[in-house]
Image (cartoon, rainbow, N blue to C red):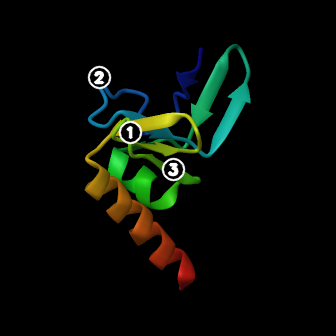
Amino acid sequence: EVSIHPSSLNFNCPHFHHPFLLYHEKVRTTKVYLRDTTMVGGYPLLLFAGKVSVSHEQGTICVDGWIEFKAPVRVAVLFKELRGRSEEH
């Protein structure tokens, strides 16, 4: 279990508008805290996070082997293609 550090802007946020939370630093004092947090949706993860794999049979796209999104195969392949093109430059 982690908590958002009291100095973080998201400390007083009553609820998150996106399903993922990125952080810059994890520290342990009286408990484990995350500092410099940012809420992130699925699209930035699909475009900029780790390795992307597409499962045509299940209709899913997976990031880093554990973040899974349901997506039509066509959409999943488009994201993978966008990633490949952005990494070329």
Q: Quadrant of residue 15?
A: top left
Residue closest to the eye, 21 or 11: 21
On screen, residue 53 above or below 27: below
User: Which residue is at 29% across, 22% downward?
Assistant: 14
Q: Position of residue 1 (x, y in %)?
A: 59, 14
Give the residue pinned by disc 3: 53
Q: Which residue is mark 1?
A: 57
Q: Is 23 placed left or right of 25 in the picture?
A: left
| Neighbour tally class for label 1: few under 14, some 14-19, many 20 plus, Cα within 10 Å | few
Q: Which residue is mark 2?
A: 14
Q: Earlier in the sequence, mark 1 or mark 2?
A: 2
Q: Is residue 42 left or right of residue 1?
A: left
Q: Amino acid at mark 1?
A: Glu
**Camera-side residue of 56 and 47:** 56
| Mark 3 vs mark 2, CA separation in Å | 34 Å
Quarter of image, res 39:
top left
Q: Local crowd at mark 3 within 10 Å, few (<14), some, or many (≥20)?
A: some
Residue 83: image x %, image y %? Answer: 46, 67
Q: Is residue 9 above or below residue 73?
A: above
- Residue farthest toward the front in the current orientation of the protein: 57
Q: Name the residue type under label 2.
A: Pro
Nearer to the camera, 31 or 82 = 82
Between label 3 and label 2, give the one nearer the viewer: 3
Secondary structure category for the residue under label 1: loop
Q: Which three-letter amino acid code belongs to the residue tagged 3?
A: Ser
Q: Residue at x 74, y 23 (%)?
A: 28
Q: Earlier in the sequence, mark 3 or mark 2?
A: 2
Residue at x 62% of width, y 26% of height: 33
Give the CA separation, mark 1 to mark 2.
38 Å
What is the distance, in whole Å, between disc 1 and disc 3 at their CAs? 12 Å
**Tag 2: Cα neighbours inside 10 Å, few (<14), some, or many (≥20)?**
few
